[in-house]
Amino acid sequence: MKKINISHVNNEHNYWLRSLNFYKTEVSILKGILTEIARKNTGAEVMKTVEHFENQFKIQTDNIDRLSHTIHVNIDRISTQAQQSNAGYIDAGLLTEHNALSGKFESEVRVITDTISSFRKFASEWM
């Protein structure tokens, strides 16, 4: 069975978690801007878009929380296996899970950045 050193995946986990925390903070800031836009512009067209972004921000925050939790679970499993190996190695099965998380992270970042970009265009029209 192929074994992988834990240090190779540890740095990636840390990067993912820091990035997700950054995006969660940014979404929180954008929610404040959205509230300001809603307060200043009460037209039906604007309110429909405000509601859309409120929903998107909630969905993205929930997705970030779920993905962060999944990453922490993966970290715990990898840590347990690395401690059991006494040499800091994990088997290929956990590496496969780690690689799947990498794809989920990249996908989530794409969705978040697209949402943020769309919101910025909207905000620039109504601020």
Image (tube, grey):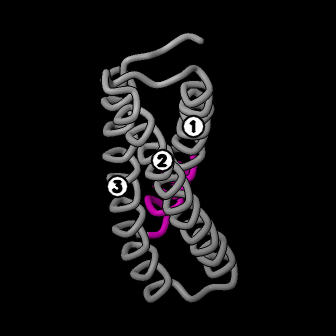
The amino acid sitting under disc 3 is Asn
Q: Amino acid at mark 1?
A: Leu
SS under mark 2: helix
How far apart are the two marked residues, 2 and 1, measured between alpha carbons? 7 Å
Sequence order check, earlier mark of 3 and 2: 3
Which one is in front, 36 or 64? Answer: 64
In the foreground, 92 or 19: 92
Cα–Cα span, label 1 and label 3: 16 Å
Q: Nearer the viewer, mark 1 or mark 3?
A: 1
Residues tagged 2 and 1 counted as in contact (Cβ below 8 A): yes
The reply to whether the C-beta atoms of the residues labelled 3 and 2 are less than 8 Å apart is no
| Residue 75 lies in the magenta-colored region | no
Instruction: Please tell me how crowded label 2 is: few (under 14), some (14-19), or many (20+) other residues with Cα within 10 Å.
Output: many
Disc 3 designates what residue? 21
Left or right of 92? Residue 81 is: left
Q: Residue at x 46, y 54 (%)?
A: 68
Q: Is residue 120 magenta?
A: yes
Residue located 53% across and 39% down the image: 105
Mark 3 to mark 2: distance in Å?
Answer: 13 Å
The span picked out in magenta is: 114-126
Mark 1: few, some, or many residues within 10 Å (few <14, many ≥20)? some
Q: In the rendered picture of this protein, how many numbered marks are placed on residues?
A: 3
Q: Residue at x 54, y 25 (%)?
A: 95
The residue most toward the top is 2
Q: Look at mark 1 in the image and give the residue it sits on.
A: 101
The amino acid type found where label 2 is placed reads: Ile
Q: Which residue is mark 2?
A: 71
Secondary structure under badge 1? helix
Nearer to me, 103 or 73: 73
Q: Is residue 86 above or below residue 120?
A: above
Question: Which is nearer the N-term, disc 1 or disc 3?
Answer: 3
Question: Of the residues tagged 3 and 2, which is closer to the observer?
Answer: 2
